[in-house]
Amino acid sequence: MAVFPTFTDDIYSDNPLVDEVRFKTTFTMFGTEGQERRKRQYLHPKRDINLKFSWITKQEARLLWEFYAARSGSFEAFYYVHPFIRTYPTSGGEQFASVCDGESVNFLVPSVGATSYTLYLQGVEQTEGVDYTFYSQGGIDGIDYVRMDVAPTAGHQLTWAFTGQLATRCRFEEDNLTFETFYNRLAKMGLKLKGLLFSDELGFATVTTTTTTTSTTTTTT
């Protein structure tokens, strides 16, 4: 899976980056006083991003437009690596990494160059060097990954707390943008990226290294 392009010169998205954490809740009303029951639909929230490059030229925007066209608009997912190093919390606020299939031992984690990291399996902290090995930027397109000592039980979830750059799996929100519209969104209104779960529809992350390859099925939301 591709990674959203970065520029080699001083072209950065506006700071602060507009990063919206998206939840989904359903409500059922009952009783004469309008009481409600709430049900959380997303166990892990999605992260939507609004990119804005106030000083980008049309030539520079063309590079991003070509990336957009190569993804077939909103069809193909990609990784967006946040440009700022931040700490993503523990105590139930870890970033979702994957749902295990009972066979795989290699899992991408949603970071690039992570430090001070902790891996959790079903909410239980794992011990590096005993339960897993961490490979900084060793996965596909420079995403961090871990190799578990033993394949986790099918259906169990991996989550990840760390300091570093967050890697968000997302897609473009819109199809059928002309270049002029695409450029205006980048320079003025912002270009929206719709956040997806970090792993694919079955929960199995993709890892491609010089020594290990794990195949996947077609990805969707």
Image (cartoon, rainbow, N blue to C red):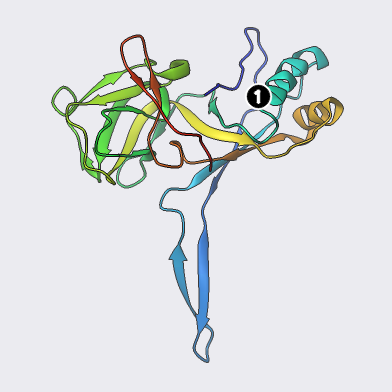
* Farthest right residue in view: 180
- Which residue is label 1 attached to? 13
Q: Nearer the viewer, residue 146 or 81?
A: 146
* Farthest bottom residue in view: 32
- Residue 79 in the image, given as x and y percentages of width and height: 53, 27
Q: Nearer the viewer, residue 130 or 154?
A: 154
Q: Is residue 142 above or below residue 96?
A: above
Q: Is residue 7 above or below residue 14?
A: above
- Residue 212 in the image, given as x and y percentages of width and height: 31, 16
In the visual, does 163 lie left or right of 22? Answer: left
Image point (41%, 52%), residue name = 43
Image point (68%, 15%), residue name = 11
Q: Amino acid at mark 1?
A: Ser
The quarter of the picture where residue 14 lies is: top right
Q: Nearer the viewer, residue 121 or 49?
A: 121
- Residue 89 in the image, given as x and y percentages of width and height: 36, 39
Image point (68%, 22%), residue name = 70
